[in-house]
Image: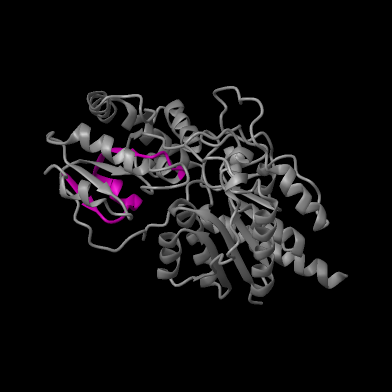
Amino acid sequence: MTKRIFFGLSGGLGPVLRSLPVAEHFRRSGHTTAFSIYGESSAAFIESRGFKHLPDDDPTVPSPEKMITGGPVFYNLDHYYAGAGLLDPDFTGAWIQHRIRMLEKFNADLVITDMSPHTAIAARYLGIPVASITQSCFHPDGQPMHYWGRTPRNLPRVTPVVNRILSRLGLPDIRGMEQLNAGTLNFIPGIPEMDPVRTNGVRYVGPIEYPAAGPAGARLPEEPFILVYPGRLQDTAGATGLGLLNHVVEAFGGKKERVLIAGSDGLPDGLKEGLPRNIGMIPYFNSPMLKNCRLFIHHGGHGSCLSAIMRGVPSLILPTHTEREFNARKVQEMGAGEYMLPGTFTAEHLYKLSMYVSEDGYKERARELASLIRSRNYGGAKEIYKRCMSLMERRALALEEL
């Protein structure tokens, strides 16, 4: 019987690239899928692959008086969502009710979430099973996001606001927003060395990659080159991607190394017109581009970290917010790269460390890790699909027995 699968995602290309391979398995088996994500470019990318996107078009916006200023540092998800407006009960209530109506209209048999708390709440309210794809720092039993330091006192908490709404919906309270990233099934698209979790209730499925992340035919240098991926130039943490690019251009401009910047957001006119001759621009990034790459400089996205490891390429990470610093520290702890916090280095320092990482033993360690991951035979997207189908089949049998 045909099933209807709804993917609720946060934003950015990372969740899209690890969800699309799962959606492809459902589509090939004849099931109906739909996505909802924030960000026009991400939505357009989903639609370009032939999948339906359902926009969150509720006009309700949070009151500015009930928002904190977002930034690159957040210590937990309560702190993060305080910058997204969830301290405002009117906005949060409308946000959740809109998602309930969306799932009712789509008539979903299964919901798959990737950092989408209102989707998880809506599914629980409607009695729809939830499969969660998440990183350990977002999971309630994972290593805390800011594990290397003490969390400050008196941070803002959106959980009490959410709990009042959950009570009205007849749902149990939560202790923290991380609990909304736990489902009936819990999948981590990575490895325990990168994503430690203190429970047996998750399944590691290994890195998930979507190879067709851009149009074919990008011209890459034949000699080993340095690839730069800034992520989005502007996100909830500010103009972090643009800052990363400015650091790289200042450090590598006029040097002998060939540098390619991969960016779906393009470049601001001033930077585009002033690029040094040894620095080029391509309109997208996908992991096969790493094949002939000597060093990958990037923003610390979870997928970017794992893609570099799987291709035996060392990373130099300039993490643009706390979650990416978590990833960067894990890459460094595994010996597959180094990281530098934005604003803590000169152009000369960045250049010299780049050369050191590209010429030292980091590449060998990345190759060792890639071999180890392949030997474990993780199931990837297919494993998620199989277990989700099994969950729906068991649920259908249970309903028939009632």
Q: In which quarter of the image is residue 46?
A: bottom left
Report whether residue 180 is seen. yes
Left or right, 193 with reference to 210: right
Quadrant holding the C terminus? bottom right
- Residue 211 falls in image quadrant: bottom left
Closest to the observer, 361 or 49: 49
At a point 69% along the width and 63% down the height, the residue shown is: 97
> Left of 397 or right of it: where is 40?
left
Residue at 56%, 70% in the rendered image: 33
**Image coords of residue 42 (percent x, y):** 44, 60
* Residue 9 locus on image (x, y percent): 55, 56
**Percent x, y of residue 372:** 45, 37
Residue sitting nearer the eye, 341 or 189: 341
Where residue 321 appears, as percent x and y from the top left, is 46, 37
Is residue 281 a member of the stretch shown in magenta?
Answer: yes
Instruction: Work out which residue is located at the far right of the displayed protein and give it.
Output: 402
> Residue 108, relative to residue 291: is it above or below?
below
Q: Give the range drawn in magenta.
A: 279-302
- Residue sitting at x 63%, y 71%: 4
Task: Farthest residue to the front: give it.
Answer: 65
